[in-house]
Amino acid sequence: MKKIFFTTLIILSTIFASTATAYALTTGNNDVDAIGNSVKNIIGGAENKVEESAQNTANSTKEATNELEKNAEKAGDNIKNGVQNVGENIKNGVQNVGENIKNTIDYSVQETSDNTNKSKTWLWILIAIVAIAIVVLFWYFAARSNKK
């Protein structure tokens, strides 16, 4: 679109300038020469302003694109870091729960040898509570990461 506009402008300017020059040369009128030169200067000035405007538009577009790229990169880094943090928190939570279950089972095994029936019931209750806690923690972190 810009090429067509500039090409048309240059062709019309050339035709107008050559016509005005030919007329001025054939008539020998100084006023016509002055008018031709004035028109030529006006067209040249308009051409310069159009080129300047096009360059300013191109520069503004380039700056906006660069800014958009920087912001998209920052957003990507923030999302990546957030997901890594959620993953680490889930991993640490599961490890802690696993250690607690192991310690509870080890302790319960010792106690079971002393109080077999009573200890087994409490052990199963404790295991059920820990299993529910694991499911609740997993659900909480999954729901939280989906919101982000």
Image: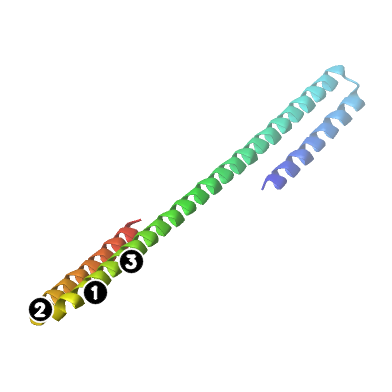
- Name the side, left or right, on which 128 lies relative to 21: left
Given residues 56 and 12, the one toward you in this image is 56
Q: Residue at x 11, y 81 (%)?
A: 116
Badge 1 amino acid: Asp
Image position of 12 with respect to 79: above or below: above
Q: Residue at x 8, y 78 (%)?
A: 118
Image position of 15 with respect to 70: above or below: above
Given residues 100 and 68, the one toward you in this image is 100
Q: Position of residue 124 (x, y in %)?
A: 15, 77
> Mark 3: which secondary structure?
helix
Q: Mark 3 highlights which residue?
A: 95
Q: Position of residue 84 (x, y in %)?
A: 42, 59
Given residues 56 and 68, the one toward you in this image is 68
Q: Mark 1 highlights which residue?
A: 106
> Mark 2: which secondary structure?
loop
Mark 2: few, some, or many residues within 10 Å (few <14, many ≥20)?
few
For residue 115, the mark is 2
Residue that sits furthest to the top in the current view: 30
> Mark 1: which secondary structure?
helix
Q: Residue at x 78, y 41 (%)?
A: 11
Image position of 30 with respect to 83: above or below: above
Specify the quadrant of the image occupied by residue 22. Answer: top right
Image position of 115 with respect to 22: above or below: below
CA distance for labels 2 and 3: 29 Å
- Which badge, 2 or 3, is on the more N-terminal residue? 3
Badge 2 amino acid: Asn
CA distance for labels 1 and 3: 16 Å
Specify the quadrant of the image occupied by residue 146. Answer: bottom left
